[in-house]
Image (spheres, rainbow, N blue to C red):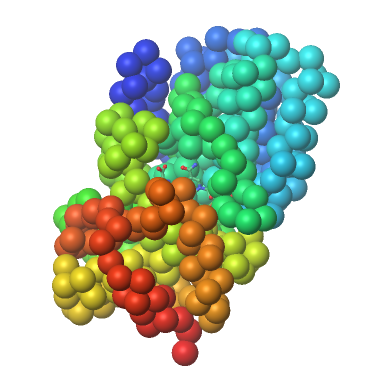
Amino acid sequence: MQTLFVELGDRRYPIFIGHQLDGSKLLDQYIQSQQVMIVTNTTVAELYLAHYLKQFQMMGRTVATCILPDGEKYKDFQHLHLIFDALLEANFNRDCTVVALGGGVIGDMAGYAAASFQRGVNFIQIPTTLLSQVDSSVGGKTGINHPLGKNMIGAFKQPEAVIADMAVLDTLPDRELSAGLAEVIKYALLGDVEFLIWLEQNMSKLLDRDREVLAEAVYRCCAHKARIVANDETEKGERALLNLGHTYGHAIESYMGYGNWLHGEAVATGMVMAASLSEQLGWISTEDVARVKDVLIQANLPIASPKIPIDEFLGYMAHDKKVLNGQLRLVLLKCLGEAVITKDFEQSQLIQSIQDNLVA
Ligand code: NAD
Ligand code: GLY
């Protein structure tokens, strides 16, 4: 097992990365409270709830559960409310701990519930998808979707600890594994060209779910994210770089209907569009764009968006949280392994980066 820390002063917290980790030993010191609410969904509950229930019970805690329906389309107010219902029905106090057991949808919703229940209670992340292990469980962004825009309502709420256990990835559907790899590739493109080379060399082992190789990838991504979050917790600056491909991707996700295109798939195509715009600006070469596409194809990810009318695509992009004073800013590539955030591109170039990457 490897342990990383997100250095946030007295809110410093560990990320435990390994396989077949013993949660009861690792978490005991991070859960001060007696009352523990495990939030999960129907799919993950069937696979892992009994195991974690037992671990928390072995720690002598009073455990209640809240099992939500499975899907991005349930990441909304109505289903957030079910978590508050469960907490209140179980008479949970301000010193309780909310545990997210699931992928990014559960992590984002449980985290937002923990941020707002009685103005904030403790929170633990047990991410069970690759995407949530490398990205969403670390850094404290939580929230829900609005029909007009993805992740538009939320709060920053750092967890007390994160447990990323590679063993749970055995049951993850192939398509979800690939979606997680999109976020892994994102870290390489935005800040670490050596990691890109490593990914190109190790992609088949990642797809075969080699636990050692997966753990290495999760460690490298979390180390990168932990550094950025420690410097810029609430995204006043460099944290925005973690959104490479996301502004385009959120437009695809929102237009297609939440859940029809997976978040990671949309981010993959969004990164191709960001690479295309970077090429138009003369920052990266045609060969670099081809290399971005190739590594995404290696990971079985889509590199072109469904045909979305351009006005609607731009309309969704305009809801992005990086829009400041009505001005769209995008994360683009200065070179492979170095991203910047910029508003210095022409509208015609933006449109071309979308239109050049729609399915034929
Ligand atoms: P998800 O939570 O929907 O999980 C994907 C699917 O895998 C679901 O059907 C889930 O039930 C299933 N699943 C989860 N663990 C499993 C396991 N071990 N075995 C079998 N099936 C399993 O999707 P996701 O890709 O984990 O997360 C996407 C969400 O994360 C989006 O809502 C996105 O906005 C959010 N996100 C948040 C951040 C952040 O910083 N907070 C960052 C990136 C993404
Ligand atoms: N997923 C981007 C961030 O956490 O900032």
What's the residue at 21%, 71% (across, down)?
281
Residue 139 in the image: x percent, y percent? 41, 34
**Hey, which quadrant is residue 338 in on the image?**
bottom left
Identify the residue shown where x is 39% and y is 76%: 351
The outermost residue toward the bottom is: 360
Q: Quadrant for ligand 2?
A: top left
What residue appears at the point 24 percent right and 68 percent down from the top-left corner?
A: 278
- Residue 244 point in image, percent of width and height: 35, 56
What is the residue that sits farthest to the right in this orientation? 89
Q: Position of residue 307 (x, y in %)?
A: 53, 81
Relative side of 37 to 194, left or right: right
Residue shown at 28%/66% (left/top)? 345
- Residue 276 visible, this orientation: yes
User: For this view, does 345 lie left or right of residue 98?
Assistant: left
- Name the quadrant of the N terminus: top left
Q: Is residue 310 above or below residue 120?
A: below
Residue 140, given in percent of the width and then of the height, sits at 46, 33
Q: Could you tell me how many numbered marks the image carries?
A: 0
Q: Nearer the viewer, residue 68 or 253?
A: 253
Q: Is residue 202 left or right of residue 273?
A: left
Q: Is residue 3 visible?
A: no
